[in-house]
Amino acid sequence: MRMDTDLRKILDRVTKGKRLNADEGLALFRKADLLTLGELANGARKRLHPERLVTFIVDRNINYTNICVNKCKFCAFYREANSPEAYILSNEEIFKKIEETLALGGTQILLQGGVHPDLGIEYFEDLFSSIKTRFTIQVHALSPSEITYIAKKADMSVQETLNRLRTAGLDSIPGGGAEILVDRVRKKVSPNKIRWRQWADVMTEAHKLGMPTSATMMFGSLETDKEIIEHLVRLRDVQDSTRGFTAFIPWTYQPGNTELGGRSATGVEYLKVLALSRIMLDNFDNIQASWVTQGAKIAQVALEFGANDFGSTMIEENVVAAAGVTFRMTRQEIVNLIQDAGYAAAQRDTTYHILKRE
Ligand code: SF4
């Protein structure tokens, strides 16, 4: 079969490690087949990580509340304040979960809500400082949506809010709530949530303060190919100016129990977007495979499609589980999967320093 000349030029640029613009990225995404994308992404990954090593982190997701003002249409996790299933964890319950995490060799807690209407900055300052006086653990907490809400409630700038939270014990910020960083999609799937510019502004402010953050993308709902590219280019632009993103984590929309409904992305769609991400995000060192949404087998294959990290052991996970998807894995299972795929495995910390090789 003859290859389109434009596609051949794009493949040549990627192979030489050159950056693709949005049009080139879109053409590649639409025209290249799965294995071509995988080969290019694997090449890009090998240039950055020549060692056959795959990392993972031991941590726990703690969702301090499921009450949320945003009521995103793709979310199966949130509850109304008057729902019998609504909850807020007490500090003691959170401390117990941290103790269990440390006992399992964990180094981080990923603490996120719900955007609860009554929880102001003082609640979080008290919680973070109480955690820090009791435990040595990375507090990786609050998505840009929560931070924007806390800032608004306190009538403070995002910068001032982040400064206060950091002083209390906030170490780094997870990249959740990015969904697709295009307002056309956000207005449909999460009309009450912050727009893409606010998401990017919180991350930029955090990076300026020296706080590392990750970045995510939830795809497979109702975005177009072009909007996926737009998302990636917007992240790449922020990273060009701040260098504060530690990793990119793409995952697929889980339609179970949601208002939005619809279908799940296939394994092939996931792998193509993962590979495209590695190719487009030439200034991101680390790309995570999402075993939580894809399961162990696709996550193993993802290591040949640009991913160099297996994410977290997820001692606890509630958000994807609420959509009816419950893949669970122990630390040893993750190590076995990485090794069976032909890679060495190593536990890392939040900023990707190696803690222990297996
Ligand atoms: S995705 Fe997050 S912000 Fe949206 S409703 Fe669910 S918990 Fe709230």
Image: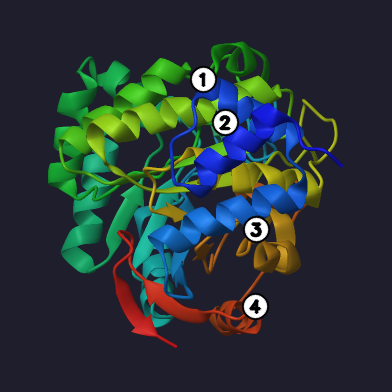
Q: Residue at x 27, y 65 (%)?
A: 137
Q: Ligand 1: does it lie within 8 Å of the C-beta at label 1? A: yes
* Residue in the image at 22% along x and 69% along y: 136
Check whether the beta carbons of the residues at disc 2 and disc 4 lie within 8 A of each other. Answer: no
Nearest to N terminus: mark 3 or mark 2: 2
Q: Residues within 10 Å of mark 3 (few under 14, many from 20)?
A: many
* Disc 4 target residue: 341
Q: Earlier in the sequence, mark 3 or mark 1?
A: 1
Label 3 belongs to which residue? 292
Tell me how far mark 2 sits from mark 4, CA to CA: 29 Å
Q: Specify the farthest residue to the bottom.
A: 358
Image quarter in which the C terminus is found = bottom left
The residue closer to the viewer here, 194 or 299, is: 299
**Amino acid type indicated by mark 2:** Glu
- Alpha-carbon distance for marks 1 and 2? 10 Å
Q: Which residue is mark 2?
A: 179
Circle 4 packing at 10 Å, graded few (<14), some (14-19), many (20+), is some
Is 355 on the left-hand or right-hand side of 218? left
Q: Is residue 83 left or right of residue 176?
A: right
Q: Relative to 130, is 98 above or below?
A: below
Q: Is residue 233 above or below residue 94?
A: above
Q: Are marks 1 and 2 in contact (CB under 8 Å)?
A: yes
| Picture quadrant of residue 173 | top left
Quadrant of image for the N terminus: top right
Q: Which residue is mark 1?
A: 193
> On the picture, is 159 further left or further right than 234?
left
Mark before the other along the chain sequence, 4 or 1: 1
